[in-house]
Structure formats: structure tokens, C-alpha cells
């Protein structure tokens, strides 16, 4: 009997695939980076064909690396970079344009106009989100406006919209499944998180024809079967969630008040609020955490656009490091005197500022500032931004979080995680399995197929690898944070 799960983790800078055992142990991983396309300042695109090709290639490779055959795989779980937007032809499967990435800011003016016209309260009331280029709806509107003939074809039902998991499932199933899971739908600005349905008023506001939209399913569901050509036999796709929700599941954050923060390309903190929808007064997002086993959970989320991407910029943009792993040693070498701050607002600032016009800044340079100090400032920027999110959550909840569970590629850096504890004042837990995004997708697929029995089993299997407790004095923490906020204020746009 097949007793393994293939987890496809399609991220912003690479596609990865993992094979997990029936005890949720990772047996293999395959990864392939793909090109980041920057047509203009503030624009970020991906080639949809590269997303699909690298996803399929890494999935096949992960099965081989695990020493398995296709008939050893019971099911597939998918997790993905959220909000990234694709539109394709229903007959040919050809994209009408590149994927517009979640980081893209080309629709900032449209968002500003909609805000000025007084629409944000209605949008937030229905979606829990704010009017920002981050989300999918204005990206769809841009494509329909700027791609010749796209709007007429969309209205005629010839085109399909999807986020990345929709695109992968469409291709995996040979175009037989046009679906989206509920957590990705909740990030489009078109999905009402109270009625749990596409909203006619929102679709009208953004000019999105209903014929474009996919069927929405729970996180554990029958999303379709792969073509036999892809893996040698059809394999059911039974789990799907946006990357941050998948990580929260992988971290077993199932109870209200549990908090995780993932440090990948960006940083995203998700606080489970249970079956009660969260309404933020501090510019955080109210969103859907998950829906499976007949239970809907909501969440508060804080979004930071640049985390690991900042380290990537140090490597590829400035050439200060040869690989991300060098950043830890350099950070340790740097002067510990406060004063140098890097505000990575390269694509604006996310929560709690939501300033699409903000731009990056390096503040506090002196003659003795070297690359070690800049690298340290880049890592500390992630920690300071996390503190901003934690403070906003504390104001919304009336109490600060006590423990933070972390995951993602950056948290293998012990210096970074200790600095995170020092600068937030929180105890930080790092799990034994840090690839919790893929793990969450695997859990969802395994729950639907019966390989895993319940969320209680998942919670019991969570294990801590390390605990990092704050060592910095309160006075020093506050002094450093005040310097950070001064640097942030210098980057904010006038509007």
C-alpha cells in the first residue's frame, strides 16, 4: 500500500518538492531556482512555464531521491507563494501574460484611487484585507486592461484565473481541474470570508468577470488526479494551502493564540484566532487560517515583504556575500554598536505600514561601516519588523504573545534566531523539522487520504529542536528599536 506523500512547495524564488513518510519524516528534497523578471521599477514577474516546469521536475526528482517509485506515493499536497496571479487560455493552457508576483507594486495608483473613493472599508469588511497591490484582484484588473483582447475573452469564459496552486493543479490534471483552496481564495480581495464565496460586489469593483474564477475547496479535498504521463500513473491531489497557512499547520498552531512566523523570501506571522474572525485595528490582516475536518479557523496575519529576499539582494545585487550561509559569520564579526539600520522597503512596506511608495534606505553609515555591519543590519531588519508585527498583534488581542514558533530557510541561522529573541523580547521555538510549509501540505494530503488520523495526531508529533530566550536588556532593546523606527520613518512616502 502506498504510504508516502509528495509535497510540492512552489515558492517565490524556487520550486521545491519533498517526499514524507507515513510518520511525517522528510525522506528527500529537490529544488530548482528560476528567473526573477523585473520589467520596470517595482514590477516583479515570473514565467508561468518556468513555474510549472521546475515544479514537475523537482517532484519527479524528489521521488527518485527518496528511492521510491510512483506507486509508493499515496497522494500529493501542494503549497505555494500566495497572491501571485496568473491568467491562461482554457483550451490551450497558454498564459496570456507572465505571472504577476505578490511583491509587484504596479497597481499602487489603482489602490490609491479606490481608497480615495472610499471603498476600503467595504473591502476590508468582506475580506479582512486592505487595498494594496499585494493582493490578486488589482493584478487581474491590470492584465484584463493591458493584455489585448483579454477582457472580452474573459467575459466570454475563454480564460481562467488562478493563484499558483490553481495553475499547478490545472497542469497536473491536464486542464480538468480549475480549483483553488480556501486559504488562497481568501487572499484575492474577491472572496468574502464570512459567506465563504466569491463576492459579486467585490468582483464588480475590480472588474473581474465571474467566468474567470475557479471552484473553491477546503484545504483537505479531492482536487483532481494527475495525468499518468507525469508520474507513471495517476496520483490524487488531496491537500492544498497557501504557504503561510501550510506552515501554521506544519507548526501545529491549531489552538487560538498560537503564533508562528515563517522566514522565507518574505516574513509572515500568523496568529490563530479560532472560529472567531479577527478584526484588526492596527493594520494587520484578518484572514482564513484553514478549513478542514469540518472546522474553519481564522487568523491575524502580519506581512513583511523582504526577509530572505534581502539576503539574496546582498548576494546578487551587492555581491557582499557569496552565499546566504556566509551571513551568520559576518553578522558575528560586525561591531555590536547600534546605529546602522537597513530598511528593506524595496517593494514598499507591508504591515503595519502598508506604504506602497516607501523605498529602501541604509541609515547611520560611518567611515568604519563595512560589509559585516551591513549584513548584520539586514538580518536585524527582519527582527525589528517582526517586533512591529508582534506589537500590533498585542494591541489587537490586548495581550502580547508569549512564545513564537519560527520556521523557514533563515532560521537555520542561530545568530539570527537569538537576535530575534533579543529584539522582540519573546522566547523563540525552532521545531525539529523547519521545512514546515511543505510538512503542512503533506499533513493536509495525508489527512484526506487517511494516512494521518487527525489534527490531534499532528499536534502530538510536533517537536522542538531549540529554544532561544532573550538575553538583551530591556533598555538596550528599546534603544535599538527606537533607532529602527527613526530609520523607518525616513523611508515612508508622503502619501
Image: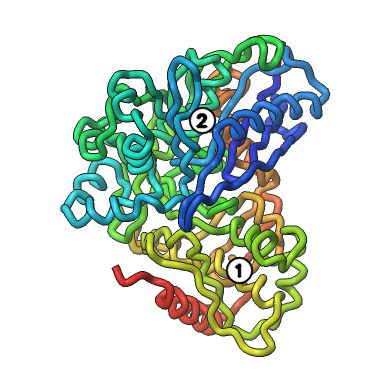
Residue 281 relative to residue 49: left or right: left
Asked which quadrant contains residue 488, the reply is: bottom left
Q: Earlier in the sequence, mark 2 or mark 1?
A: 2
- x 71%, y 75%: residue: 372
Q: Quarter of the image containing the C terminus?
A: bottom left
469 and 337: which is toward the camera: 337
Q: Is residue 329 visible?
A: yes
Q: Quarter of the image containing the N terminus?
A: top right
Coordinates of residue 178 in the picture (x, y in percent): 44, 20
Q: Secondary structure at mark 1?
A: helix
The correct choice, above or below, for 165 with respect to 263 in the image is: above
Residue 34 relative to residue 215: left or right: right
- x 69%, y 61%: residue: 315
Q: Residue furthest left?
A: 117
383 and 475: which is toward the camera: 383
Q: Which residue is mark 2?
A: 165
Badge 2 density bin: few <14, some 14–19, many ≥20, Cα 10 Å: many
Coordinates of residue 292 in the picture (x, y in percent): 45, 27
- C-alpha separation, residue under disc 2 versus residue under disc 1: 31 Å
- x 37%, y 62%: residue: 355
Badge 1 density bin: few <14, some 14–19, many ≥20, Cα 10 Å: many
Asked which quadrant contains residue 287, the reply is: top left
The correct choice, above or below, for 281 with respect to 361 in the image is: above
Q: Which residue is mark 1?
A: 378
Q: Secondary structure at mark 2?
A: helix
Q: Is residue 7 visible?
A: no
- Residue 218 tag number: none
The correct choice, above or below, for 367 with respect to 260 in the image is: below
Q: Residue furthest right?
A: 67
- x 59%, y 66%: residue: 420
Instruction: Determine whether label 2 and label 1 are within 8 Å by CB.
Output: no
Amino acid at each position: 500500500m502506498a504510504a508516502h506523500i509528495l509535497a510540492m512547495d512552489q515558492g517565490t524564488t524556487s520550486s521545491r518538492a519533498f517526499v514524507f513518510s507515513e510518520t511525517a519524516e522528510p525522506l528527500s528534497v529537490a529544488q530548482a531556482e528560476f528567473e526573477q523578471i523585473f520589467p520596470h521599477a517595482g514590477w516583479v514577474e515570473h514565467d508561468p512555464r518556468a513555474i510549472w516546469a521546475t515544479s514537475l521536475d523537482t517532484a519527479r526528482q524528489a521521488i527518485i531521491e527518496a528511492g521510491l517509485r510512483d506507486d509508493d506515493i499515496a497522494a500529493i499536497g501542494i503549497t505555494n507563494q500566495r497572491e501571485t496571479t496568473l491568467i491562461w487560455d482554457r483550451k490551450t493552457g497558454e498564459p496570456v501574460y507572465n505571472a504577476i508576483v505578490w511583491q509587484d507594486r504596479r497597481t499602487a495608483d489603482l489602490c490609491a484611487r479606490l481608497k480615495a473613493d472610499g471603498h476600503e472599508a467595504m473591502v476590508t469588511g468582506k475580506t479582512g484585507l486592505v487595498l494594496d497591490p499585494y493582493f490578486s484582484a488589482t493584478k487581474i484588473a491590470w492584465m484584463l486592461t493591458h493584455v489585448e483582447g483579454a477582457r472580452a475573452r474573459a467575459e466570454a469564459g475563454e480564460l481562467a484565473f488562478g493563484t499558483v496552486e490553481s495553475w499547478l493543479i490545472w497542469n497536473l490534471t491536464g486542464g480538468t481541474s480549475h480549483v483553488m483552496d480556501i486559504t488562497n481564495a481568501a487572499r484575492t480581495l474577491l472572496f468574502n470570508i464570512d459567506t465563504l464565496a466569491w463576492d459579486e460586489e467585490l468582483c464588480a469593483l475590480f472588474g473581474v468577470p465571474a467566468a474567470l474564477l475557479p471552484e473553491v475547496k477546503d484545504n483537505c479535498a479531492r482536487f483532481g488526479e494527475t495525468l499518468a504521463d507525469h508520474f507513471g500513473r495517476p496520483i490524487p491531489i488531496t491537500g492544498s494551502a497557501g504557504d503561510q497557512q501550510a506552515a501554521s499547520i506544519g507548526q501545529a498552531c491549531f489552538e487560538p493564540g498560537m503564533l508562528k512566523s515563517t522566514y522565507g523570501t518574505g516574513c509572515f506571522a500568523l496568529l490563530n484566532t479560532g472560529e472567531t474572525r479577527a478584526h484588526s485595528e492596527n493594520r494587520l490582516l484578518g484572514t482564513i487560517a484553514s478549513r478542514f475536518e469540518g472546522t474553519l479557523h481564522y487568523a491575524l496575519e502580519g506581512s513583511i515583504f523582504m526577509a530572505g529576499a534581502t539576503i539574496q539582494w546582498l548576494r546578487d545585487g551587492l555581491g557582499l556575500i557569496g552565499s546566504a550561509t556566509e551571513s551568520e559569520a559576518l553578522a558575528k564579526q560586525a561591531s555590536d554598536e547600534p546605529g546602522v539600520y537597513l530598511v528593506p522597503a524595496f517593494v514598499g512596506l507591508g504591515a503595519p505600514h502598508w506604504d506602497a511608495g516607501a523605498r529602501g534606505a541604509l541609515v547611520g553609515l560611518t567611515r568604519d561601516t563595512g560589509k559585516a555591519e551591513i549584513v548584520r543590519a539586514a538580518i536585524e531588519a527582519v527582527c525589528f519588523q517582526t517586533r512591529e508585527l508582534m506589537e500590533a498583534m498585542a494591541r489587537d488581542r490586548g495581550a502580547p504573545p508569549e512564545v513564537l514558533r519560527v520556521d523557514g530557510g533563515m532560521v537555520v541561522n542561530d545568530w539570527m534566531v537569538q537576535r530575534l529573541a533579543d529584539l522582540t523580547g519573546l522566547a523563540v521555538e525552532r521545531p525539529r523539522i523547519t521545512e514546515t510549509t511543505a510538512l503542512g501540505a503533506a499533513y493536509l494530503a495525508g489527512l484526506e487520504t487517511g494516512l494521518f488520523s487527525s489534527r490531534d495526531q499532528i499536534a502530538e508529533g510536533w517537536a522542538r529542536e531549540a529554544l532561544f530566550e532573550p538575553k538583551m536588556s530591556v533598555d538596550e532593546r528599546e534603544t535599538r528599536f527606537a533607532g529602527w523606527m527613526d530609520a523607518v520613518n525616513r523611508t515612508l512616502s508622503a502619501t
